Image (tube, coloured by chain):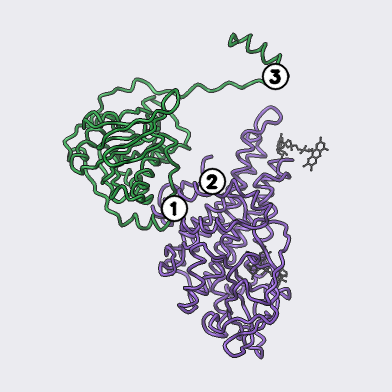
Amino acid sequence: MPDMYDNSRPDRYFTEAHQAFRQSLRAFVARDITPNVEAWEAAGHLPRDLYRKAARMGIQGVLFPEEVGGSAGDFFMQVVVTEEMARCGAGGVCASLGSHSIGIPPVVAHGSDALCAAFAVPVIAGEKIAALAVTEPGGGSDVAALRTTAVRDGDHFVVNGEKTFITSGMQADVITVAVRTDPVSRGAGGISFLLVEGDTPGLERRALKKMGWWASDTAHLTFTDCRVPADHLIGVEGQGFRAAMMNFNSERLIIAVQAYSMAQVCYEEALAWARQRRAFGGTLTEQQVIRHKLVDMAARIDAARTLTHDIIWRRMEGLDPLNVHVARTSMAKIQATEAMKFCADQAVQILGGMGFMQGTASERIYREVKVLTIGGGTDEVMRNLAASQLGI
Amino acid sequence: MKVLVPVKRVIDYNVKAKVKADGSGVDLANVKMSMNPFDEIAVEEAIRLKEAGTAEEVIVVSVGVKQAQETLRTALAMGADRAILVVAADDVHNDIEPLAVAKILKAIVDEEQPKLVIAGKQAIDNDMNAAGQMLAALLGWGQATFASELTLDGDAATVTREVDGGLQTITVGLPAIVTADLRLNEPRYASLPNIMKAKKKPLDEKTAADYGVDVSPRLEVVKTTEPPVRSAGIMVESVDELVSKLKEKGVV
Ligand SMILES: Cc1cc2nc3c(=O)[nH]c(=O)nc-3n(C[C@H](O)[C@H](O)[C@H](O)COP(=O)(O)OP(=O)(O)OC[C@H]3O[C@@H](n4cnc5c(N)ncnc54)[C@H](O)[C@@H]3O)c2cc1C
Ligand SMILES: Cc1cc2nc3c(=O)[nH]c(=O)nc-3n(C[C@H](O)[C@H](O)[C@H](O)COP(=O)(O)OP(=O)(O)OC[C@H]3O[C@@H](n4cnc5c(N)ncnc54)[C@H](O)[C@@H]3O)c2cc1C
């Protein structure tokens, strides 16, 4: 299968080390992940052994500093991981294996050394599973309105409230929970991050059934008088909202990468199918209608990928003011998820009846479009954000 | 004990090779290149010997174009300790013949004094299956080719070889040359931490002239052609029809 991109030679974004890791990951994903996707989807979660294997490859620690067991790679190294992981064609695998990449950065950036040693290090080593719990049944987009409370009682916080749609929430040993530590404040000011262990008494978890991402365990969490040691507070009390928002930029870029990479999987599956499928005396690739569909797919993938890489590069070079970066990141998330939506739709169409059948990547990815246009900031919220950042 | 592993940069095994218009060989311009898969197995075996405490140092060598240093970096990222690049060609289409490679390797063996050389049984580009054997002859060492199992015990290596009729187990005294077959092991994938470490490992660059070896070709390629295109098959309805078709073709 010829690649639309030459991933063997370095360019402005990817050095030799990036491409070397890409080759290595491609083989790892093809051998240790893709053949197992259906079994993991049936199980509804990933095996713990996979986290260890991924950690040994350097997947789990790609961006984290060496002190906590990471490789201190640059953001393009994360792009390599996300692009190559997506080749398994199952977003749920990527989501659950990557849930620590939203849960653990606040711990490493703002947590005490003791918290890092006890929780960040084992997660990065693949020994523990981490999750981030922000969204509540009462609302996800409006983070500042969250209602879960953590009230100080001696050397503990007592946590009460509910979180929902939490990725890896069933299996997580370490949950970074956004809570309101100042009961008087109603807005962004009183929000903090608290690290709650999965086996804390009073924490109940319920698995949620979903349209897609079946290999990822998504949970509804209920906290009833959960006592959490006060030193599990991550960073400064009341600074949680800022930390959550900073986290979001990277998360959105990664979602964009995942989206155009999934689009690429659809394109490749549709192309391979169209090349060998015969109808009306020739292959489907001989039909102009199909050829045009494939080009339209390739063009959208290329546009989303190029945009996303440019945003990341300009961020690394420090070229854009923050508002421009945030606006472009929001727009890239929209562009890339639209490319995925378009490509999944076209691929299923090109596959014909087979595209409606389980067992094809395109069928699965078609069901995974919506979570990427909702999670990590909905399309509408992204447009609102871009508009305000651009001063519209 | 030092182990030396020669590695070759070849056309990636996933790439569908295309013959150059003038028939002089396979077109390698802008084609993805990788480490010869049998050499990967050889590197893996050497690293396992090191991990088991049998070998102290794993040295990888590549003879070819300058870009072969990427191949050496891959070997370093898998776990080899240092690398020697012998630049012997400036065009990717100039393949260095096995005898010249063996002569360069001999010079390096004389310098480095490894007790074991593990090579791939053949390179997947030209399928010569010769460099290891020629090196053994030049050095006057024992050789165990097509290895599917290797155990070291003091001054001897016990090697299971994949031969036509099955498996053959032989013992060779060290120093020796072993060439790796497909089932010797399953090579590891380079992890990110090891790729980062590999950047700092030593990679010496030499030329064929440094070893006084003349690499000019002795073989002449007469012609290179694409394999014949397979014609379309036919579906048969029954066993009887299959048998009669085969009879028609005169194959049964
Ligand atoms: C599979 C999955 C996994 C998830 N994993 C996690 C996780 O690990 N951790 C976590 O914390 N959360 C997680 N989420 C939650 C996700 O972040 C939220 O679903 C998302 O933020 C949207 O919140 P909501 O579902 O409450 O929708 P709402 O906020 O209720 O929004 C509903 C609709 O209203 C629109 N809307 C809201 N406000 C505005 C406005 N101002 N203007 C215009 N339109 C508006 C939205 O765009 C949306 O279309 C996950 C979600 C899914 C589906
Ligand atoms: C759930 C389900 C139930 C079904 N039930 C039945 C049933 O009960 N009985 C039955 O007989 N069938 C049934 N079908 C089959 C259905 O009718 C076929 O899937 C449909 O006719 C398309 O055929 P195909 O899947 O072979 O796709 P193909 O014919 O291979 O087409 C693949 C793609 O190529 C396109 N294409 C093909 N030819 C051209 C062309 N000349 N120019 C441009 N584009 C072209 C198509 O539009 C499509 O996008 C069912 C299918 C499904 C998914």
**Which amino acid type corresponds to the residue marked 2 in the rendered image?**
Ala
**Chain ID at mark 1:** A
Does mark 3 have its CB less than 8 Å from ligand 2? no
Q: Residue shown at 52%/71% (left/top)? A: A119
- Helix or strand or loop: what does disc 3 sit on? loop
Query: For residue A333, what is the image quadrant?
Result: bottom right
Q: Nearer the viewer, residue A155 or A186?
A: A155
Callout 2 touching callout 3 (CB < 8 Å): no
Q: Residues within 10 Å of mark 1 (few under 14, many from 20)?
A: many
Callout 3 touching callout 1 (CB < 8 Å): no
Residue A105 marker: none
Q: Residues within 10 Å of mark 2 (few under 14, many from 20)?
A: some
Q: Position of residue A232 (x, y in %)?
A: 55, 80
Q: In the drawing, does residue B112 fall left or right of residue A25?
A: left
**Which amino acid type corresponds to the residue marked 1 in the rendered image?**
Phe
The shade of chain A is purple
Q: Are marks 2 and 3 on the same chain?
A: no
Quadrant of the image containing the C terminus of chain A: bottom right
The shade of chain B is green
Q: Position of residue B246 (x, y in %)?
A: 63, 12
Q: Residue shown at 45%/30% (left/top)? A: B18
Counting residues from the start of the chain, the first of labels 1 and 2 encountered is 1
**Which amino acid type corresponds to the residue marked 3 in the rendered image?**
Val
Give how far apart the Cα atoms at labels 1 and 2 are.
14 Å
Residue beneath label 1, please? A21
Residue beneath label 2, please? A30
Quadrant of the image containing the N terminus of chain A: top right
